[in-house]
Image (tube, rainbow, N blue to C red):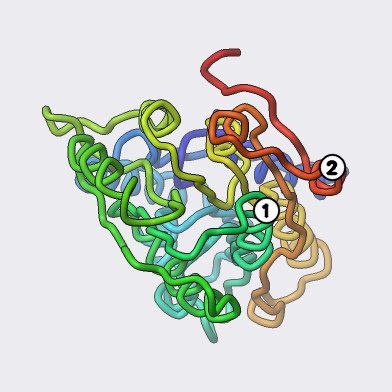
Amino acid sequence: MSYHASWKWNREQFQGFKSVLSDLDVEYRVVELDTKRNSNPSEIKTKAVQAERIIEAWRPHLIYANDDNAQKYLIQKYVNSDIPIVFSAVNRDPSEYDFVGADNVTGVMEYEHINPTIRLLLQLSPGIKRIAVIVDSDPTWKGVMGRIRSDIRDFPEIEITEWILIETLQQFKDKVRYLQDSVDAIAMLGVFNIKDENGSDVDYEVIQRWIVENSRLPDFSFWQSRVERGTLCAVAVSGREQGLLAGDMARRILLEGTSPGSIPIRPSSNGIPMINLQRASMLGIKPDVNILLTSDTIRGYAWDR
């Protein structure tokens, strides 16, 4: 897995995947690249080499790999090998990993629910016209930004005025302060590969907490973990659905002998509308009762629990 096993997003995917195969006698060996907590490329490559050694020694019947960094640092090496590969939660175009047309690869794309999220944001704060998008250096965001550029055309009244690549905590703070008077909302995408003054990765909860305490702008993202940590709203991608779909693909490969390349790569489809009510209150937003009835609501912030 690209991240760490205790990361909720990873955990939900893996639980969904395993549940589809629960009636089979399956042995799992899990390798964590841990790139959310440590984005140093040399250390990631070291962990990828360790994973390669396990694969070469164990010769698994199938590899399940989730999120982009696992594909970038490990899985590409096994494209068109004799080991079936199923992926989930990939954001970048699958052709970038040589997956398109590969005989041994299939999987589930993580396509964000961009239009539903923007609609939810506008229901909460109708006056939004200018949006800034914040990303870090993770390769995931290239695909996400491309989809935002495409989908935002459905909202002619809205302009993305800033695409901001953040590298350091101080840069993040300076940019968010600047944005208070230049945009109406912030898309919080990349909040992981951000360094402190010593060059160490800053825990993303520190980033989330700082913006809650220092920004008066509505913000949005596409994942439940962000709304739990103070982002105003999202129509969230379901990690469990990603894992369930990947598990179904793996089952067809293992039980029916289906060639992975004959199973179409596809996205998951179900989004979960979510609102952080404490953040809404801080921003002076009072959600309409109909919005509340059709959304999951979160009260408070993860760091207060």
Residue at label 2? 289
Residue at the location (36% across, 30% down)?
214
The quadrant of the rendering that contains the C terminus is top right
* Residue 275 in sight: yes
* Residue 29 in sight: no
Give x and y (percent) for residue 25. 79, 42
Residue at the location (25% across, 47% down)?
178
Residue 46 is drawn in which quadrant? top left
Depth check, mark 1 against mark 2: the one in front is 2
Looking at the rendered structure, the secondary structure element under dot 2 is helix
Residue at label 1? 235
Looking at the rendered structure, the secondary structure element under dot 1 is strand
Q: Is 288 situated above or below 155? A: above
Of the pair 130 and 48, the residue shown nearer to us: 130
Give x and y (percent) for residue 168. 19, 40
Q: Residue furthest left?
A: 198
Looking at the picture, which amino acid does disc 1 mark? Val
Of the pair 179 and 63, the residue shown nearer to us: 179
In this rendering, position of residue 248 left or right of residue 143: right
